[in-house]
Image (cartoon, rainbow, N blue to C red):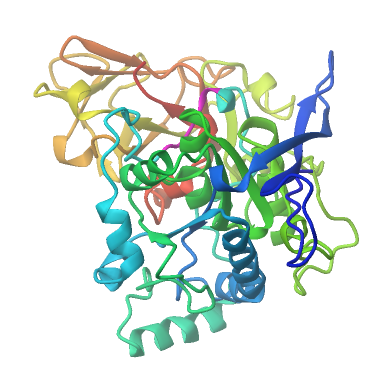
Amino acid sequence: MLMVIVFPAGIQRSHGDDLKLELRSQHRVAGSEFWKRATSQQTWAAAETAVIVCDVWDKHHCLNAVRRLEEFAPRMNDVLKQARRSGATVIHSPSDCMAAYAEHPARQRAIRVPHDKSAPQHVAYWCSQIPTEELAEYPIDQSDGGEDDDPAEHAKWAAELTALGRNPGMPWKMQSALIEINGEQDYISDKGDEVWNILQSRGIKNVILVGVHTNMCVLGRPFGLRQMVRNGKNVVLMHDMTDCMYNPKRWPFVDHFTGNDLIVSHVERFVCPTMTSDQILGGQPFVSKYDSRATRDVMEIPVADVNAATYQNQWTTAPLGTTWNAATQGKILQQPDAVWMRCTVRLSKDWLGDADTSLNGPELNARTKAWMNGVPLTLSASEKGRMTMAAESIVADDLNLLVIRVDSSTDPTHLPLPPTIVNGKRELSLSGRWQFRIGDDPAWSNIPLPAKFGIGSDVLFEPR
């Protein structure tokens, strides 16, 4: 467990502004599929440490998410106050809210920081996967957006937001008033390059991430965990000052807080260490009053009863072309009927160029349908196994959701073979893990939010 020990005012620290850390991470037990938690001791200089506050918005479309955040936000504010006193830098990053802070001293301070000419190439972009995650299986299905409200309460909440003049789907306008911004010391920015400039200008080597939501923004934002790892910072997640977006009605069908634990476990295994707020403030780690579980800090996905119907009720990850026997743990040996498959792809503006983009593969025929970000692909009348993507359906330099429905496979004992994206002379093989589902529901052709928020890191393809 990563422990940041900052002594209260009046108590002498033996190493000046050094922060004594105990990092909690997970390592695979040699020769097995099991993982074990471990701790390691580190010392960070407070002057070389920043705390980034991710998307602690004033409003959210999920009422339960608001309740959980507002419960731990006062403690988060105390963490930030103590971090400032110790000499650490505080950066507030409420995405999409910079207009509210246009004249704020902390926003102006961020804008004035000189540009770092050695900034990493993709530091301004969302980051959906780092190399250490490539072999990881993502632990939850968040493709419905993770909203876990009671329907009646949610409808009432949406009406309240509308009455306030807010878009009930994106109601945030600024950071929560429960989090204080020090106009003389702090910074405000939601831009990855600006945050990077701040870190470099202040000699920041170490970063603590707090805020929401772990499985989406905290991991993926341009100032999030993955970018910090990819660009060489010592980064840690304060896991009792965060929350995830997870709906218990989705796989793996566990309660919300166990879903949150599973995301923390994923972070500890494949991204970075974690810590708790008591290492800043003393006392005990924060525990939500809504969390009534007897067992917490769950590491492994609970084993559930699996049968053939399971693969109609949830998306499951497997490499395309593998046998149904292997993909379903022996529950399905043949699947001659419709199969749905989906993945995400990131295509840069340079890779796309000016050429047409198509999806090519042996399973693509008149009985196949495909969508890019919900826009249907068009089957070529002249070239077998080729479907054309509309240029306007592709978002360059961002995640795109590719969904394919195969009416019947060439070989009913195997999942369909992987296709390839072709653009001019460039090719991107989509050989690897996809999500699949059997049955037939037109709603599966898209998800109710951008792919970068809804799909895990284990089904991502991008040119190398």
Question: Which of the image's four quarters has the C terminus?
Answer: top left
Q: Position of residue 104 (x, y in %)?
A: 30, 71
Q: Nearer the viewer, residue 452 or 12?
A: 12
Q: Nearer the viewer, residue 180 or 438?
A: 180
Q: Position of residue 235 (x, y in %)?
A: 58, 39
Q: Residue at x 42, y 88 (%)?
A: 160
* Location of residue 208 with respect to 32 vertically, above or below: below
Examine the image and state in which quarter residue 342 appears.
top left
Q: Position of residue 147 (x, y in %)?
A: 54, 64
The total of numbered circles placed on residues is 0
**Residue 288 painted magenta:** no
Q: Residue at x 31, y 38 (%)?
A: 398
Q: Is residue 254 visible?
A: no
- Left or right position of 7 against 179: right
Q: Nearer the viewer, residue 60 or 334?
A: 60
Examine the image and state in which quarter residue 358 appears.
top left
* Location of residue 246 with respect to 183 vertically, above or below: above
What is the magenta range?
127-131
- Left or right position of 290 against 82: right
Q: Is residue 383 visible?
A: yes
Q: Position of residue 176 (x, y in %)?
A: 48, 75
- Toward the left, the furthest residue is 354
- Left or right position of 82 against 162: right
- Toward the right, the furthest residue is 294
Q: Residue at x 54, y 56 (%)?
A: 213
Question: Which of the image's four quarters has the N terminus?
Answer: top right
**Residue 128 painted magenta:** yes
Question: Magenta span: helix, strand or loop, mainly?
Answer: loop
Q: Residue at x 23, y 37 (%)?
A: 394
Q: Nearer the viewer, residue 299 or 275?
A: 275
* Location of residue 53 with respect to 307 vertically, above or below: below
